Image (cartoon, rainbow, N blue to C red):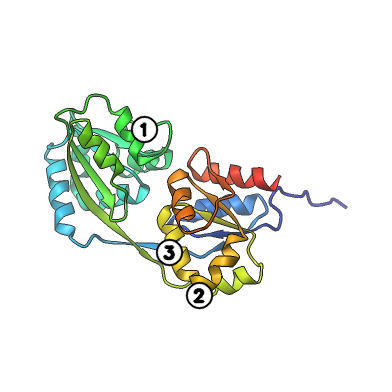
Amino acid sequence: MSVAQELPLDGVRVLVTRAAERSDGLVQRLHNLGAIPLVRPTIAYGPPAEPALLAEALTRLAAGAYHWLLLTSVTTVEAVACGLGDQVGQLRTQPLLQIGAVGPATAEACQRLLGVTPAAMPERFLGEELAGVMGELVGRHVLLPNADLSRPVLEERLRAAGAIVDRVIAYRTVPAPGGEELAAMLAAGELDVILFTSGSTARYFVQQIGVHGLDAARHTTIICIGPATADVCRELTLLPAAVADPYTEEGLIAALLDIKS
């Protein structure tokens, strides 16, 4: 009789806080390693408060008004593709337009949804790092569609380098419904690890669990997808046990495996 091989994360109970439509790949990776993922999104996405501003910027984009389109998340790529609609093919006919993507997942979404391979991607998958891999920026017109909660660091670096930047809100990050049971689960020790994939997932997690859940969360292993997310956790008095490197889902899993090995 064969004995089932033990998996490296057998029985580890992992809270996945990212938006529901972004969690499938991470959940599958956890399952494959024997973990028990609990999907409780703390964030969701909504349309921008002023959709006309995004529509106007995308009309200019399709007309060839920009040298660069910078995309800092898969959700941004989706918003741009949806907003362009039938005009998305025009991006491939503009010889002066280049696209910058924050990391491999965003780059893959560019190819899949926009039909364009990004010309620039930083070694460290942080939005602000894009400014350092774009070459000469003086006088370059840059379209920067962002989430409403995005930090202004990239825009500031682009302007400091001489770029002419149009920053528009492509989508809003909003609290996800639910999560009322998380505080009790944390207090009962029913979660071993919490994964945060953005600062907003951490902020809205704390909003969901309230003051009574925060102390229990501090005694749970916390892993963040990157340094910006880790900084937000520290602001919230949640100390990360590890920060992914690279700043990807794969990096999160590697950090978790390292802690549990």
Q: Which mark is residue 204?
A: 3
**Residue ID at (49%, 53%):** 234
Image location of residue 61, percent across then percent down: 16, 41
Answer few, some or many: residues within 10 Å of disc 1's Cα (few below 14, many 20 plus, some between 14 and 19): many
Answer few, some or many: residues within 10 Å of disc 2's Cα (few below 14, many 20 plus, some between 14 and 19): few
Query: 39 and 228: which one is in front?
Result: 228
Q: Amino acid at mark 1?
A: Met
Point out the frontmost of discs 1 and 2: 2
Could you say whether the residue bearing mark 2 is in a helix, strand or loop? Answer: loop
Q: Which residue sits furthest right?
A: 1
Image location of residue 57, percent across then percent down: 15, 47
From the viewer's perspective, is 218 left or right of 76?
Answer: right
Tell me if residue 119 can be seen.
no
- The residue labelled by disc 1 is 121
- Residues under labels 1 and 2: Cα distance? 39 Å
Tell me if residue 23 can be seen.
yes
Query: 23 and 254: which one is in front?
Result: 254
Q: Quadrant of residue 116?
A: top left
From the viewer's perspective, is 221 left or right of 177?
Answer: right
From the viewer's perspective, is 109 left or right of 36?
Answer: left
Mark toward the start of the polypeptide (3 vs 2): 2
**Residue ID at (54%, 66%):** 214
Could you say whether the residue bearing mark 1 is in a helix, strand or loop? Answer: loop
Q: Amino acid at mark 2?
A: Glu
Q: Quadrant of residue 222?
A: bottom right
- The residue labelled by disc 2 is 180
Check contact, mark 1 vs mark 2: CB within 8 A.
no
Mark toward the start of the polypeptide (1 vs 2): 1
Image location of residue 124, percent across then percent down: 43, 34
Image location of residue 212, percent across then percent down: 54, 73
